[in-house]
């Protein structure tokens, strides 16, 4: 009997799975939208586009192969002319948990946060223009800076984390109630943030702002640029190390003996073209024998520009909700510029569209209100402790948003 050794391919890491989603912006939209409701490729294409129906269908299949989508329904008849239409639902959101977040180089974390916050602002702007943002007076949109000690900071972050999970639980419960109630579903956006703001906060320094990349440093979208790093552990290690110090491809190859210089040099070149590295100097002489050795460092984020999402009517700009948004965006900009926004990995920044019924909406608003009022209780307790502990106060900004977004076609929900 002849024994053969079969090499089993290891399961992809979560970062590699994220790379599949981030490889094309339309994939991230597919996963986000299908987490709220099932859709077929043709339905999605009709609502969001995506180049062509064939291209969208290929994205659906790739996401299904990677475990991001699952088939939940098949339909025939009607305008399908004998063809079978497949409906999918996202199995999970493409979010980055704290453990995974801590393994990502800081420069990537900062630009990711910048883009996520920018998308949230666009979501608010769309709802304000469509007049759904303030259509229900019970909607919640607040932000507040808090003076805390470390104990209170951790408690506040945990409360925001729980609120995010409760939003997903409310959607899961609404899924069971809506088919029986015949109630019109609500498309609700939940946006949550808790980040350190400039002040007397002892945090590690960030990269100099002068080394920020130009937005035009790569023709690829941000998600595609991010996917290139997530999909390659060596590239991820390069960016991680060059967040800490300047290094040449030769130095990196010598430090990591399992990597050849040509492979490393090729990755340095690619990461520079993608805007994740920047050349900071050259050296000659010594053992270089007349050749030049180039040194690189990881770039900082290109801080978002509010003008990219603020092109909305004057009537909307005059609303209180718009004023809250502009104040919040300025607070976030200051934190990103100062490097405090992502200096710690246990901050919170999420936004997600969910489908709710009236009961789920009421319960989620109540949960957001409760978290908001408890913030000030946490601050009061922290101030009492700070008077005797001598601990340096920390400034944490918390934003809570629960509002209705413009309705989509949700006729086939479950």
Image (tube, rainbow, N blue to C red):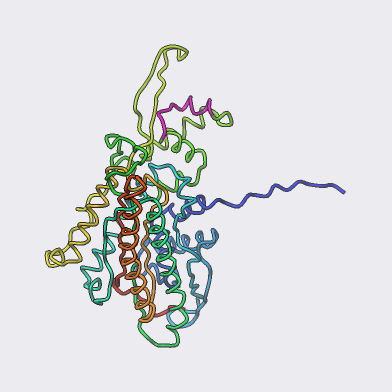
Work out whether 126 lies above or below 282: below
Provide the residue span drawn in magenta. 244-255
Work out whether 257 lies above or below 25: above
| In this rendering, position of residue 178 left or right of residue 14 | left
Query: Does the stretch in magenta take in 249?
Result: yes
Give the tally of numbered discs. Answer: 0
| In this rendering, position of residue 231 left or right of residue 53 | right
Query: Does the stretch in magenta take in 61?
Result: no
Q: Which residue is drawn at 38% across and 67% down?
A: 45
**Residue 124 sits in quarter:** bottom left
- The residue nearer to you, when weighing 22 against 242, is 242
Work out whether 144 lies above or below 172: above
Residue 21, position as x, y percentages in the image = 45, 56
Residue sticking out furthest to the bottom = 181
Q: Residue at x 40, y 36 (%)?
A: 243
**Residue 282 sits in quarter:** top left
Q: Which residue is drawn at 20% across and 57% down?
A: 327
Residue 68, position as x, y percentages in the image = 50, 62
- The residue nearer to you, when weighing 1 against 146, is 146
Residue 298, position as x, y percentages in the image = 38, 36
Q: Which residue is drawn at 42% across and 16% down?
A: 291
Residue sticking out furthest to the right = 1
């Amino acid at each position: 009997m002849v024994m053969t050794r079969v090499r089993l391919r290891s399961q992809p890491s979560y970062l590699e799975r994220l790379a599949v989603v981030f490889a094309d912006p339309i994939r991230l939209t597919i996963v986000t939208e299908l987490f709220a409701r099932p859709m077929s490729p043709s339905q999605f294409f009709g609502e969001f586009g995506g180049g062509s129906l064939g291209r969208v269908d290929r994205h659906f299949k790739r996401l299904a192969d990677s475990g991001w989508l699952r088939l939940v329904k098949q339909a025939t008849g009607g305008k399908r002319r004998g063809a079978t239409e497949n409906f999918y639902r996202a199995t999970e959101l493409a979010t980055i948990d704290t453990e995974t977040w801590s393994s990502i180089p800081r420069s990537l974390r900062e630009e990711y946060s910048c883009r996520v916050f920018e998308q949230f602002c666009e979501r608010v702007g769309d709802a304000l223009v469509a007049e759904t943002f303030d259509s229900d007076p019970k909607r919640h949109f607040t932000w507040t800076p808090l003076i805390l000690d470390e104990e209170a900071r951790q408690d506040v972050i945990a409360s925001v984390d729980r609120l995010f999970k409760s939003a997903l639980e409310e959607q899961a419960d609404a899924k069971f109630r809506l088919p029986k109630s015949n109630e019109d579903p609500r498309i609700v956006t939940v946006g949550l943030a808790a980040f350190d703001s400039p002040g007397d906060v002892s945090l590690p320094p960030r990269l100099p702002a002068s080394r920020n990349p130009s937005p035009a440093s790569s023709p690829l979208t941000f998600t595609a640029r991010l996917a290139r790093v997530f999909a390659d552990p060596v590239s991820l290690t390069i960016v991680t190390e060059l967040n800490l110090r300047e290094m040449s491809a030769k130095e990196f190859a010598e430090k990591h003996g399992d990597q050849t210089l040509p492979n490393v040099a090729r990755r340095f070149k690619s990461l520079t073209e993608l805007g994740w590295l920047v050349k900071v100097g050259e050296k000659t002489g010594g053992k270089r024998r007349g050749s030049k050795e180039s040194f690189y460092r990881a770039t900082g984020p290109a801080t978002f520009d509010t003008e990219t999402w603020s092109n909305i009517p004057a009537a909307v700009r005059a609303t209180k909700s718009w004023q809250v948004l502009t104040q919040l965006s300025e607070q976030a900009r200051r934190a990103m510029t100062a490097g405090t926004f992502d200096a710690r990995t246990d901050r919170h920044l999420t936004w997600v569209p969910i489908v709710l019924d009236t009961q789920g909406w009421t319960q989620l608003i109540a949960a957001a209100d409760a978290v908001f009022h408890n913030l000030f209780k946490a601050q009061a307790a922290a101030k009492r402790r700070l008077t005797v502990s001598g601990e340096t106060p920390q400034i944490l900004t918390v934003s809570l948003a629960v509002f209705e977004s413009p309705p989509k076609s949700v006729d086939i929900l479950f």
